[in-house]
């Protein structure tokens, strides 16, 4: 078989996987399509054990109702039941999903819906489409030369980035406005969690995660993993800090609003840099024709 045959098989296989995947998604027969998604309410919250692992999350008791039967379940977030809960307060809604008819096989997410709520099993066919496109780019490189491959790779990416730029700018402006409107609260580090891991080269490193407890102006008592960098995290147990949180959503908080503003600027800068590089690559390919 010559390279053309291998490329043809590559593209044919990708098209087949994509068609099957999209067909199953539309028919609702994928794992995501068979999943029941509902919201659970936090009924009780406990402070994590000082020196424990962040992988266990914040201990909570959650109540949810099966939409099909109306039966109510009260469960905990023991390890192995989905995402690690990083922010909790009594009354907060968390996402619960489980196979249809098996509510005891529940998994939790750090929000009402979870990151994969709208996926519906289309991740695999999306990847197959990308692989087919990569195969077509390879065909362009073999048949017509690398300038065409450069145009085929960078051109669509530049168009995609340019199309998403207005939405990105609106999102950054919205996050900046929300950060500016944050209110302050006094927080205390009630625990420091310790996790020891080993990288691929056998080097051992330790991650320290402070756990904050603070009360909003409305009287909501919040316990949360601290996402911001604070000095001497390992010895921060018992320390008092000032947190800034969104008035309507205590899960959106920071101990360093200036860093939040810098991250917003970097988001826009990186998007513009990627747009410039892809547009330059497409222009370079056009010039080399």
Image: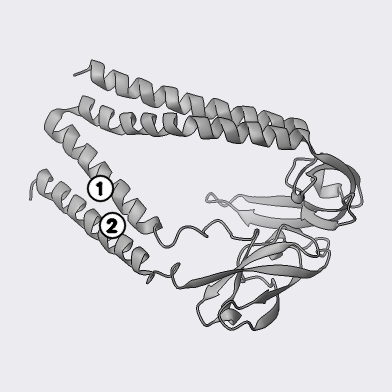
Q: CA distance from mark 1 to mark 2?
A: 9 Å
Left or right of 115 in this view: 29: left
Disc 1 on helix, strand or loop? helix
Q: Nearer the viewer, mark 1 or mark 2?
A: 2
Q: Of residues 199 and 214, which is closer to you in this image?
A: 214
| 24 over 189 or under it: above or below | below
Mark closer to the chain start, 1 or 2: 2
Q: Of residues 279 and 205, which is closer to you in this image?
A: 279
* Display colour scheme: one colour
| Residue density around tag 2, few if under 14, some if 14–19, many if 20 or more, within 10 Å | many
Residue at the far top: name it: 287
Disc 2 on helix, strand or loop? helix
Q: Residue placed at 46% from the left, 58% from the top?
A: 119
Residue at which label 2 appears: 18
In the rendered image, residue 30, in percent from the top left (x then y), is placed at 39, 69
| 191 over 283 or under it: above or below | below
Q: Residue placed at 70% from the left, 77% from the top?
A: 75
**Residue 132, label in figure:** 1
| 6 over 93 or under it: above or below | above
Residue 224, quarter of picture? bottom right
Q: Residue placed at 80% from the left, 45% from the top?
A: 247
Left or right of 200 in this view: 142: left
| Residue density around tag 1, few if under 14, some if 14–19, many if 20 or more, within 10 Å | many
| 160 over 221 or under it: above or below | above
In the rendered image, residue 29, in percent from the top left (x then y), is placed at 37, 72
Q: Are marks 1 and 2 in contact (CB under 8 Å)?
A: yes
In the rendered image, residue 130, in percent from the top left (x then y), is placed at 32, 46
- Quadrant showing the C terminus: top left
């Amino acid at each position: 078989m010559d390279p053309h045959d291998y490329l043809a098989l590559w593209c044919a296989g990708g098209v087949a996987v994509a068609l099957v995947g999209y067909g199953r998604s539309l028919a609702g027969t994928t794992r995501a399509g068979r999943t029941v998604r509902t919201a659970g309410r936090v009924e009780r919250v406990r402070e994590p054990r000082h020196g424990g692992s962040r992988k266990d999350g914040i201990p909570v008791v959650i109540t949810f109702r099966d939409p099909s039967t109306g039966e109510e379940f009260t469960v905990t977030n023991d390890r192995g039941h989905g995402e690690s809960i990083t922010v909790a307060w009594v009354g907060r809604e968390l996402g619960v999903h489980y196979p249809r008819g098996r509510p005891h096989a529940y998994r939790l997410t750090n929000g009402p819906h979870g990151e994969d709520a709208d996926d519906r099993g289309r991740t695999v066919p999306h990847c197959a489409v990308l692989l087919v496109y990569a195969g077509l780019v390879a065909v362009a490189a073999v048949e017509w030369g690398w300038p065409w491959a450069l145009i085929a790779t960078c051109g669509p990416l530049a168009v995609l980035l340019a199309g998403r730029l207005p939405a990105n700018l609106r999102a950054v402006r919205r996050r900046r406005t929300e950060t500016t409107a944050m209110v302050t609260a006094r927080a205390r580090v009630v625990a420091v969690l310790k996790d020891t891991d080993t990288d691929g080269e056998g080097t051992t490193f330790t991650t320290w995660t402070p756990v904050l407890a603070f009360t909003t102006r409305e009287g909501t008592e919040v316990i949360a993993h601290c996402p911001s960098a604070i000095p001497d995290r390992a010895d921060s147990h018992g320390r008092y800090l000032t947190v800034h949180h969104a008035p309507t959503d205590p899960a959106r908080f920071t101990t360093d609003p200036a860093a939040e503003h810098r991250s917003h600027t970097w988001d826009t800068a990186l998007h513009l840099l990627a747009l410039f590089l892809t547009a330059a690559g497409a222009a370079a390919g056009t010039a080399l024709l």
